[in-house]
Image (cartoon, rainbow, N blue to C red):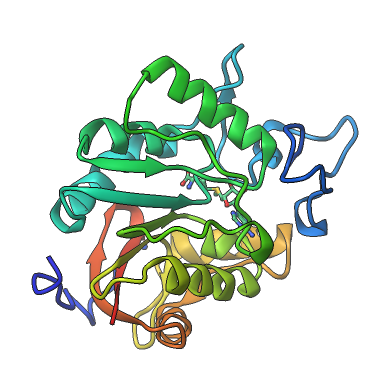
Amino acid sequence: MFQGDGIQGAARSTAARFNLPRGRGRRPPAHFQSRSGPGRDIEAAVQTLDPQTRRPDGALASPATARNAGPILEVLKAHLPARGRVLEVASGAGEHAVAFARALPGLEWTPSDPSPEARTSIAAWAGAAGLPNLRPPLALDVLDEAGWPRETVEAVVCINMIHISPWAATEGLMRLAGRVLRRPGGLLVLYGPYREAGVELAPSNAAFDESLKARDPAWGLREREAVAAAAKAEGLVFTLRVEMPANNLMLLFRAV
Ligand SMILES: C[S@@+](CC[C@H](N)C(=O)[O-])C[C@H]1O[C@@H](n2cnc3c(N)ncnc32)[C@H](O)[C@@H]1O
């Protein structure tokens, strides 16, 4: 697994809101507090710019997830161990968690999200799927160390969070991953759009970056090199870059 990683195609151009109890009845941190009122929409609930539909049971669905789950799964299949525990950070609606837990039955998959509406959605998808290897969602905020799990896992997966949260969330994610990936070879998998030195930003990613910053100036596409440096500071070495559809990347890191 570890030996199979290698930098791929390095220089080519490529791409809360809150209701459930969170921990011990604490308020969510300010960066998750809702814009309340009549303008509040479903996408704001799980901090995404993707359009979403909601089923009566609270399960949220987005066309983007339906499109990217298959390609992401192919990479996960190639690099995750056959058995062990996976912690998914920022699971959002939970469609990925269900798809991945179903396709990877040897892994115990724990989804998480600080948004109660996201956790309601994850629980709804999970209830309908009835998968024995899919654990209930954790109220995990990478900016709130007090709520981080203590156990060791084989892998941490984080899809589409880094650009839609402040840089401190990336640093928190790396600290969390460094803490739970205690065994050498432990795997951190990221998916999303990135900037890269010497690679022209695809027009669609440039427009996405602008829309993120218009929503919150602290959000935006991150530089792959800066993300790798933040990982290295927590003992995680960048091992693989995979080009994905729609100008996204998957980045793999290993605990040393
Ligand atoms: C664009 S959504 C991605 C959801 C899902 N992974 C997907 O790709 O469909 C971003 C997610 O990041 C979560 N998020 C934002 N800040 C976070 C933080 N500090 N800790 C953990 N998750 C966070 C949000 O609640 C939201 O569910």
- Compared across the picture, whether 240 is left or right of 93 comes to left
Q: Which residue is found at the position 67% from the left and 33% from the top?
A: 117
Asked whether 64 or 57 is in front, the reply is: 57
Which residue in the rendered view is the most extreme toward the left?
4
Image height of 195 relative to 41, above or below: below
Asked whether 138 or 75 is in front, the reply is: 138
Residue 227 in view here: yes
Screen quadrant of the N terminus? bottom left
Asked whether 5 or 104 is in front, the reply is: 104
Residue 207 in view here: no
- Compared across the picture, whether 173 is left or right of 36 comes to left
Give the quadrant of residue 25: top right
Please state the horizontal and vertical placement of residue 126, each as a whole percent of the image: 44, 25
- Compared across the picture, whether 171 is left or right of 232 comes to right
Q: Which residue is found at the position 43% from the left and 80% from the top?
A: 231
Please state the horizontal and vertical placement of residue 120, each as a whole percent of the image: 61, 28
Asked whether 4 or 248 is in front, the reply is: 4
Which residue in the rendered view is the most extreme toward the top?
56
Image height of 223 relative to 214, above or below: below
Q: Which residue is found at the position 18% from the left and 54% from the top?
A: 81
Which residue in the rendered view is the most extreme toward the right?
37
Screen quadrant of the C terminus? bottom left
Please state the horizontal and vertical placement of residue 74, each as a whole percent of the image: 18, 47
Q: Give the number of callouts.
A: 0
Q: Which residue is found at the position 20% from the left and 39% from the top?
A: 106
